[in-house]
Amino acid sequence: MQVVDSLRLGGTERMAVDLSNALAARGWTVHLVATREAGPLAADLSPSVILHPLSRTSRWDLSGLRAFRRLVRRQRPAIVHTHGWSTLRFVTAALAPGIGVPPVVHHDHGAARYRARSGLYKLVAWPLVQAHLAVGPSFLEPPLRTRHRLVREVVVNGIPLDRIRAKDDYAVGVPARLVSVGNLRVQKDPLGLIAAVALLADRGRSVVLDLVGAAPEPELEAACRAAAAELGPDVVRFLGRVPEVGQQLGRYDLGIVGSRTESGPISLIEYLAAGLPFVTTEVGEVVARLPEDLRRWVVPPGDPAVLADRIGEALDLDADARAAIGRRARAVADELSIDRVAEAVEAVYRRLGAG
């Protein structure tokens, strides 16, 4: 049983859906519980994954807690796998320790840093959690305090590689087309990215930036649109959700990750799988594991001028050099598949006596 707050657009939600599909393909019976609501990502679920939206209305919605407890009693899952701290709090509140409660696997996607939480908050893990998975090693320190012998594993994010279409034309267009995939959130620093595009425009470079993703923070969206308007029409475009965006990445000249903080980032894996030249800030475990020959395209976060410099360098390469980056990127992406994630998760389940 995979459990997540919702199926809105987001990295945690995307991983819950992709992992559910991958486990179902490997023979598991998978129930995916969205404790608050479903959402656009429900359309991406495999028909063999059984979806349960609970529609809880608040953190401690008693009817939602009772509904989840009844569901667990009825389905008797071998594992309850929670995605994110909010979901873990809900699950541990619903499942009081006792006979028949399955092992809980907590999957930390980094949205709430464990080290920043109070001791009382951390106690939610104590009664039930038997495994702590994290997308990067920093999220495993300090270790969770539980009454069980804890299994601890780093499981770097992955994606279904078959949903990405490879790029085949590496000539840079006029204007050059940039894409940034990810929800407009403060930690992703979209204002910094727009500032970098403004610097490129000041240098006489013709570029168009497409921002792909939801905009869940209205004040930030308004600030981004105001900054974009100063650059003129159609320099920065807000596309919202783009279905099957992985099929369209090959149309762009460069993929950008401009975040200040990030745990994945899944968008970088998508760029790599598409063979799309990229520039990324130094955020998350996927970036940390890039081979040395691709680290030229990694810049410090929070510095639009350096980001603009590196974007310009990537666009100035000739088609052969850019194609070589694309080939190398696809080779790296082969190690970042959702099948690798599912295999690692299965191994943890079996250590806990499931499967």
Image: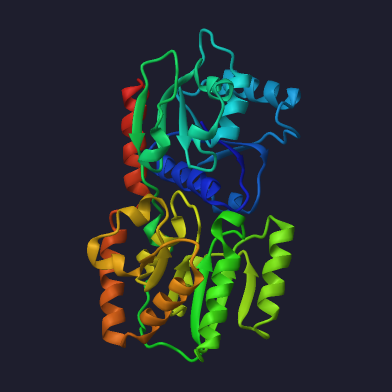
* Vertical position of residue 311 compared to residue 283: above or below: below
Q: From the viewer's side, name the closer residue of 80 and 265.
A: 265
User: Where residue 274 sits: x, y (%)?
Assistant: 38, 69
Q: From the viewer's side, name the closer residue of 284 and 156.
A: 284
Please identify the quarter of the rendering in which residue 33 is found: top right
Which residue appears farthest toward the top when viewing the image?
99
* Vertical position of residue 174 compared to residue 259: above or below: below
Q: From the viewer's side, name the closer residue of 218 and 276.
A: 218
Q: How many marks?
A: 0
Is residue 341 visible to the viewer in this orientation of the structure?
Answer: yes
Residue at x-position 59% and y-position 52%? 41
User: Where residue 343 sits: x, y (%)?
Assistant: 32, 40
* Vertical position of residue 104 compared to residue 305: above or below: above
Check the picture and name the quadrant holding the C terminus: top left
Residue at x-position 46% and y-position 45%? 21
User: Where residue 67 sits: x, y (%)?
Assistant: 68, 24
Is residue 242 visible to the viewer in this orientation of the structure?
Answer: no
Task: Say left or right for 211 vs 66.
Answer: left
Please identify the quarter of the rendering in which residue 51 is found: top right
User: Where residue 29 sits: x, y (%)?
Assistant: 46, 33
Task: Say left or right for 328 vs 95.
Answer: left
